Image: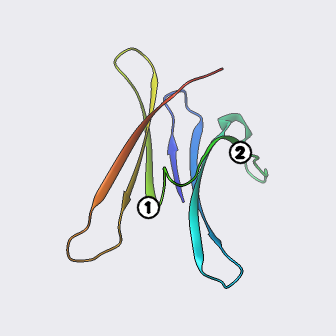
Amino acid sequence: MGLTTMPDGNLLLAELAVHTDEEGVRAYRRLRISIIDRATVVPGAVVEPTTITEIDPPLIYEKYESIEARLGPNGETLIYIMADDGKMRAENTMVRMFELIEL
């Protein structure tokens, strides 16, 4: 799970879910990215994230461990997620970038 502040001050949450088949074998991973309205983050509150996307295979197999957001050169919000393959000696690191498009 990862959490970062977006350029507008709201929070961006990344949650990784591992799904298993009937035999208990990990079948695939799903990455859910949500926005939390900063105005809802107050002491004692229960916040409700708004899911903006869920990424499934074949676009994701990695264990994403980091999320970041920034403004791009044209004022667009760019979202970066980072993963490594979990091998200790020679890790393969993957960074993906998405543009947040508001509908």
Instruction: Estimate how packed mark 2 is, as few (under 14), some (14 to 19) or many (20 or more) residues with alpha carbons within 10 Å.
Output: some
Picture layout, residue 58 above or below residue 70: below
Identify the residue at the far bottom of this view: 23
Q: Indicate the secondary structure of the residue bearing disc 2.
A: loop
Query: Residue 102: x and y, percent?
Result: 61, 22
Marker disc for residue 49: 2
Residue in view at x 43 percent, y 16 percent: 75
Residue in view at x 45 percent, y 20 percent: 76
Relative placement, left or right, of 45 versus 72 is right
| Quarter of the rendering occupied by the N terminus | bottom right
Which quarter of the figure has residue 40? top right
Q: Amino acid at mark 2?
A: Pro
Camera-nearest label, 1 or 2: 1
Query: Residue 26: x and y, percent?
Result: 58, 75
Q: Amino acid at mark 1?
A: Glu
Residue underneath mark 1: 62
Which quarter of the figure has residue 30? bottom right
Marker disc for residue 84: none
Q: Indicate the secondary structure of the residue bearing disc 1.
A: loop
